[in-house]
Amino acid sequence: MFEFSFFLQLDWEQIKTVLLSLNEGFLKSLEIFALTLLGAIPLGLIIAFGSMSSVGIIRWFNKFMVWIVRGTPLMLQLLIIYYGPGIILGNNWWGSGALGRFIAAMIAFILNYACYFSEIYRGGIEGIPKGQYEAGEVLGMTKSQIFFKVVLLQVIKRIIPPMGNEVITLVKDTSLVRVIAVYELMWNGQDFIKSEGIIWPLFFTGIYYLLFSGILTIFLGWLEKKMDYFKV
């Protein structure tokens, strides 16, 4: 039978200390999450346009970059972006402080997720029937008007499910920044194993991730239903 006695022996002051540390780590994870989306969503659209460009050099460069980023682990990209300049170029752009590590982490995250988002965008845009573009031209609309007033809203409807999956994955991927010593939720939860010799804070850490993912899942489901009036 599973023993719960260790829960009964918990010191409330210790619980308070753990929760304060986890709250601090969660705020950092939330910051990474929000800034990644803020940078990756528009950058992904730019990369998608580049991948669909009629200019061969631009198109193949974008596709090659997306292939590299999607084909290698995010953790590897974090290590290369943070340590690479110092080791390869002999100039540590980021410095050794917390701010430098955080900036390097954000560059890696934004670039990584922008490449994934770009493929989702591209699939959504290319999935719109050509007749929609032709109808817009017949009505005298410019290409930008056709895209933003006719195509974009339909694309949003199409991409919400795959984008939602990537957003949920991002919640968990924020834990990877600990590899370059950015003190987020997972780092703070794991630190109690080394400092206090206790493992139960990791269960609390899991609850934070589950609650955040659950809230996002509910929101994304609501958003998908709100877009149901686009029958595509």
Image (spheres, rainbow, N blue to C red):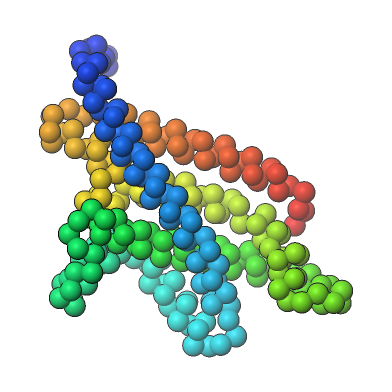
Q: Is residue 226 visible?
A: yes
Q: Is residue 30 above or below residue 103?
A: above
Q: Which quadrant of the figure has residue 16? A: top left
| Quadrant location, the C terminus | bottom right
Q: Position of residue 45 (x, y in %)?
A: 55, 67
Please tell me which residue lies in front, 13 or 99: 99
Q: Is residue 47 above or below residue 154?
A: below
Residue 202 at least partly seen: no
Nearest the camera: 13 or 78? Answer: 13
Q: At 18% across and 74% down in the image, what residue appears?
A: 91
Q: Is residue 174 above or below residue 126?
A: above
Q: Quadrant of the N terminus?
A: top left
| Residue 193, image x, y percentages | 16, 33
- Residue drawn at 15 percent across, 76 percent down: 90
| Horizontal side of residue 106 vs 201, given as left or right | right
Question: Percent from the top left, x then y, of residue 105?
Answer: 31, 58
Look at the picture and state if 181 lies above or below 72.
Answer: above
Residue 221 location, x and y as percent? 61, 41
Q: Residue at x 35, y 58 (%)?
A: 106
